[in-house]
Image: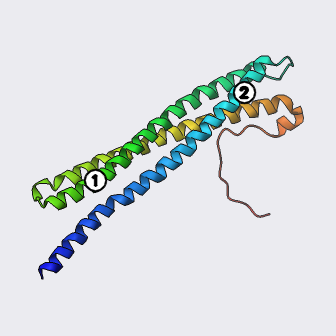
Amino acid sequence: MPVMDALSSALAVLTAMITPAVLISACGTMILSTSTRLGRVVDRVRSLSDRLEELARGTQELELLGERRAVIFNQLDKLTSRARLLQRCMTVFYMALGTFVLTSVAIGIVAATGSARYNWIPVVVALVGTCFLFYGSILLIFEARLALSTIHAEMDFIWRLSQHLAPVELVEKHRAPRRVHFRRHQTP
């Protein structure tokens, strides 16, 4: 019977050590997603920077030139904020990842020493990691809202530009929507 107790105890420790692996996987997914978002922001900054240089060098008269420059400048400002938020998110997610790995190590060490006195350490370390993961998720919410505001600003400018360039009768026919309305599709 002592062999069964030892096996049961070993399996319990291994199970406890594997549990943080789910959170480690979640951190890896968040890091990958955040890294991809950061790469897209950097690409967009480079694209807008090149466009701003073209506008500065350009000799041709463009419609709404001053407004184009202002929109690009505002986009670059918001993209800079997004990049900083995403960098902070990645740092926080890496800290969470390290903390969850440390949780597995702490579970193993506590089990190896056999001292019930230190059973609280892996729990505290896991809670710290969970707090990091939560904080990184909150930062991503702020970044997503900032991303949405950049899209809205860009679409508003494109709408104004299209109104400026399109024939008057077409502009009168299509007014800029103030809100997105979801209507049920009506059958004729």
Q: Which mark is residue 50?
A: 2
Q: Residue furthest bottom?
A: 1
The x, y position of residue 2, in whole percent, is: 12, 79
Q: Quadrant of the C terminus?
A: bottom right
What's the residue type where badge 2 is placed? Asp
What's the residue type where badge 1 is placed? Thr
The x, y position of residue 113, in whole percent, is: 14, 58
Q: Is residue 34 visible?
A: yes
Location of mark 1 (residue): 103
The CA distance from mark 2 to mark 1 is 46 Å
Asked whether, in this view, residue 169 is left or right of residue 100, the answer is: right
Helix, strand or loop at mark 1: helix
Foreground: 71 or 117? 117
Q: Earlier in the sequence, mark 2 or mark 1?
A: 2
Residue at x 48%, y 38% (from the top left corner): 142
Foreground: 64 or 26? 26
Helix, strand or loop at mark 2: helix
Q: Quadrant of the N terminus?
A: bottom left
